[in-house]
Image (cartoon, coloured by chain):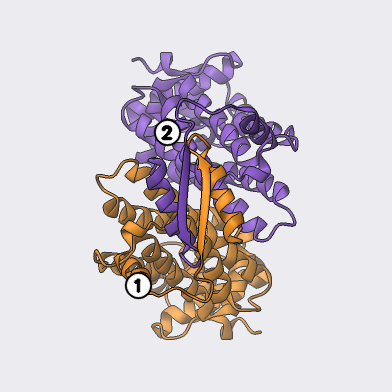
Chain colours: A orange, B purple
Amino acid sequence: MSSSSAVPAARPPIRDALVAAAFRLFLERGFEQTTVDDIVALAGVGRRSFFRYFPSKEDVVFPDHEGCLAEMTAFLAASGPEHEPVRRVCDAARLVLRMYAENPAFSVQRYRLTRQVPGLRAYELSVVWRYERALAEYLRGRFAGRPDGTLRADVIAAAVVAAHNNALRSWLRSDGVGDAGAAVDHALAYVHRTYARPADAQAVRSGAAGAGPGPDGDVVVLVSRRDAPLWRVVQELETVLDRS
Amino acid sequence: MSSSSAVPAARPPIRDALVAAAFRLFLERGFEQTTVDDIVALAGVGRRSFFRYFPSKEDVVFPDHEGCLAEMTAFLAASGPEHEPVRRVCDAARLVLRMYAENPAFSVQRYRLTRQVPGLRAYELSVVWRYERALAEYLRGRFAGRPDGTLRADVIAAAVVAAHNNALRSWLRSDGVGDAGAAVDHALAYVHRTYARPADAQAVRSGAAGAGPGPDGDVVVLVSRRDAPLWRVVQELETVLDRS
C-alpha cells in the first residue's frame, strides 16, 4: 500500500496533503527526524498552513480525533431518558471504531508509528483519556443522585474504553484484517451485559414484558441461603441457566 | 502546612532535598517557570545530582511512582494459584493508595499542581497506564486459554484503576481529609463484586462451604423463566436479597 492512498478522504485538500506528506516522511525517516519544515516542503505549502490545521507535529498523526471527540460529545448531548445509559456509551464508543475502520491502511500505519515513538504514545493516552472523560461525564449525569453514581460512571466508562481498545488493537495488530466492527460489538456486549440495569432500560423492559415464552420458556427454580455471597448465588444461577 | 514538611520521609537526603526544593519553587513560581538550575541552587547541590535521581523535571513531581510500580510488579509476580485474581489486582491497587496516603499534604499539593500543568497531566496519564498494564498483564496470565481472557483481563484492570482513582481523587479534592483507605476499599469492593468468579476463589469457596448459616441464614427461593435475560434474573435476585 502506498502512504498517499492511506490518507482519509473528504477533508480539505491542503490538510490531506499535509497528512500524506507527514506520514510519508515519518515512515521513511522516523517521527523524531522529521521537522514541520520537511513536511511543508514536501506538501508544497507554507509553514503557516501547517499550523492552521495542526497545533503541533503530534497532532498531524491523529488528524481525526478532534472531530471524533466533537461528534461523540454531540451524540451524548443528544441523548434522552429513553436511552439506556450503558448502551448509549457503547454506541458512543463505536464512533471511534468507525473512524479507525474508515481507513484501515492509515490506521495500521499510525498504530505502528505510535508504538515506536513515546511522545506519540503519550499523546494517544491523552486522547483516550478525553474520550473516557466524555463517556464518564455523560454517565455521571445519568446516575446523578444515586448511591455510588460517580463511582459507577467512572468504572463503566473505563470498562467501555478498555473493551473497545482491546478489540481495536487486536484488529490493528492483525494489520486491519477481519471485521473490526464485529470484534468491537463482541467486546462491548461483554461490558453491557455486566453493567446494564433493567431500571435504566424502559424500552428493553417493555420489550421483555411483551415477549411470550420462547422455545425454552420453562421455569427455573433456584434455592439459596440468604447469607450466601451474591457472586455464589449468581454462579449457581449461571450454571442452572447454562450461560456461564 | 509548609512545603518542606510535605515531603516523603525515609529517602536519601539529597533526593529529599531536591523534591522539597522543587515543590517549594513549583508552588511559588509555577512549574513551567522553574528550571532544574533553580531547583539545584535552592537544594544546594550540583546539577548532576538532580539527574542522578530524576530523568526530567516531570519526574521530581512523582518521586515515588517508579518504586511503587516495582513494588506492584513484585507483588503480582509473587502471586500463586491460591490467590483469587480479581482480589489480587485490587490488593495491588491498594499499594498505590498507600503511597498517596503516607503523606497527605504532599499528595494534595501534587494533585493541585498536576491539574494546573498539562505536561504533568500527561505524565500522570502515562504512569496510570503503566499501573493498568501491570494489572492487565497479570490477569492475562491468570485468564490464559479462557474464552475472552484478554478482554476480561483488560476490562477488569481498567475497572480496578478507575475505581481506585475515583476514590483517591475524591480524597485529594477534599484536601486529604477523611479515610482514604475506607473509600478505596469501598470502590474496589464494587469492582470485586462485579467480576470475581467462584471458580477462581478456592480459598473463598472452601471458607463459604465451611461456614454455618449466619443470623440471616434462611432460604431464598427464586423462580424465573429460563428464557429471561440473565441481567433480569440477577436484578430479581438482588431485589430478593436486598443487596441492590
**Can residue A99 be seen by looking at this rendering?**
yes
Could you classify mark 1 by the number of other residues whose Cα lies within 10 Å: few (under 14), some (14-19), or many (20 or more)? few
Please name whichever residue, A177 or A235, is drawn nearer the observer in this view of the structure. Answer: A235
In the rendered image, the vertical position of residue B132 relative to residue A48, given as above or below: above
Q: Which residue in the structure is indicated by mark 2?
A: B168
In the rendered image, the vertical position of residue A231 relative to residue B51, given as above or below: below
Q: Which residue in the structure is indicated by mark 1?
A: A207
Quadrant of the image occupied by residue A116: bottom right
Left or right position of B170 against B204: left
Q: Say what amino acid the circle numbered 2 marks.
A: Leu
Q: Chain of mark 1?
A: A
Location of residue A176 in the rendering, given as x and y in whole percent from the top left corner: 63, 76
Are discs 1 and 2 less than 8 Å apart at CB?
no
Q: Residue at x 73, y 36 (%)?
A: B77
Q: How many numbered tags mark residues here?
A: 2
Location of residue B186 in the rendering, given as x and y in whole percent from the top left corner: 43, 33
Dividing the image into 4 quarters, which one contains the C terminus of chain A? bottom right
Dividing the image into 4 quarters, which one contains the N terminus of chain A? bottom right
Quadrant of the image occupied by residue B1: top left
Q: Residue at x 44, y 55 (%)?
A: A195
Q: Say what amino acid the circle numbered 1 marks.
A: Gly
